[in-house]
Image (cartoon, grey):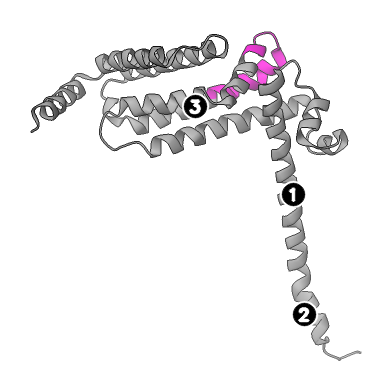
Amino acid sequence: MNTDAPSPVRRRNARTGPTAAGKEIGRQAQKSASTRKMIVDAVLQCLIKYGYANTSTPRIADEAGLSRGAMMHHFSNRNTMIQAAIEYLHAKRLRAFRRAVSSLPETEPHLHDALMAYWRQVTHPLFVAFHELAVASRTDKDLERILKPAQAAFYREWYQLAVDLFPEWQSDRTSFILALNFVQSTLEGAAVRRLSHPMSGQEEEQLFDYLETCLRNLMPADLKSRTGTKRLETVSGA
C-alpha cells in the first residue's frame, strides 16, 4: 500500500481545480448573457430603424455583428428573439420610469413632474419599437400571443408604481384608475401622432397644462382641499 502523502503541488491543484472550473463556467455564462443582450439590443434597433416586417433574422445578425449560426446558438428562431426583446423592452421601460419617479420632489401631488417623466419615456426611441410591435400584433397572431401577456404584466407593474407614487389618491380608487387611463391614452396617443405630425413646443405645453388641470379635477376631495390650501398659502406668502 502506498502511504505517501499527496505532494504539495497535488494538494494545491485539488484545491484550485474546482475554483478554476467554476470561474470558467462563470465566464462562459457571462459571455453568453452578454451575447444574448447584444442580440436583443439588435432586435430593438432593427424595429426602430426598419419596422417589424423588415426585422429579419439576417438583418438582426448584421445589426448585432454576429454570424447567423452564432445567433442561432442562443435563440432557435426569430420568434424567440422577438419574445426576449419584448421582455427586455418592458423591463427597461419600467426601470427608466422607476429612475425618473425616484428623483421627483417629495411635495404632493407633483403631477407636472410625473407627467413629464412619462412623456420623456413615450417619446424615447424604445417607444417606437413598442409601437411597431403593437401595430404588427393586430394581424400577426403569433406576435399577439407573445405581446399580450407581456403587455398585461407591464401595465400591472406600471399601475403599482403609480400607486406607490400617488398614495394620496387611493381614497378614491375609481378616479385614480380613470386618471391613469386618461394619462396613458393622452400621452401615448400624442407620442404616436408625434411620429408623423409633431406638435410645436407651445402646443405640447398647452396640452400638458390642460391635462394637469383635468387631473386636478379628478383628485379626491380631501386632496383637492389640501392642495387648494397650500396654493393659497403660497400666494399669500404664509
Of the two numbered discs 1 and 2 in the rendering, the one whose residue sits closer to the viewer: 1
Highlighted magenta segment, given as a residue range: 135-152
Q: Answer left or right for 91 relative to 7.
A: left
With respect to residue 47, does 140 lie above or below?
above
Amino acid on which disc 3 is placed: Gln
The residue drawn where x is 75% and y is 24% is 79
With respect to residue 225, does 17 lie above or below?
below
Question: Whole-percent x and y of residue 115?
Answer: 38, 24
Return the mark for residue 121: 3
The residue drawn where x is 80% and y is 26% is 59
Quadrant assignment, res 13:
bottom right
Q: Secondary structure at mark 3?
A: helix
Of the two numbered discs 3 and 2 in the rendering, the one whose residue sits closer to the viewer: 3
Q: Which residue is mark 1?
A: 31
Mark toward the start of the polypeptide (1 vs 2): 2
118 part of magenta stretch = no
146 part of magenta stretch = yes
Return the mark for residue 112: none
Question: Whole-percent x and y of residue 4?
Answer: 86, 91
Q: Answer left or right for 22 relative to 96.
A: right
Q: Answer left or right for 236 relative to 215.
A: left
* Residue nearer the viewer, 37 or 149: 37
Label 1, label 2: how far apart the Cα atoms are: 28 Å
Question: Whole-percent x and y of residue 158?
Answer: 46, 28
Q: Secondary structure at mark 2?
A: helix
Q: Which residue is mark 2?
A: 12
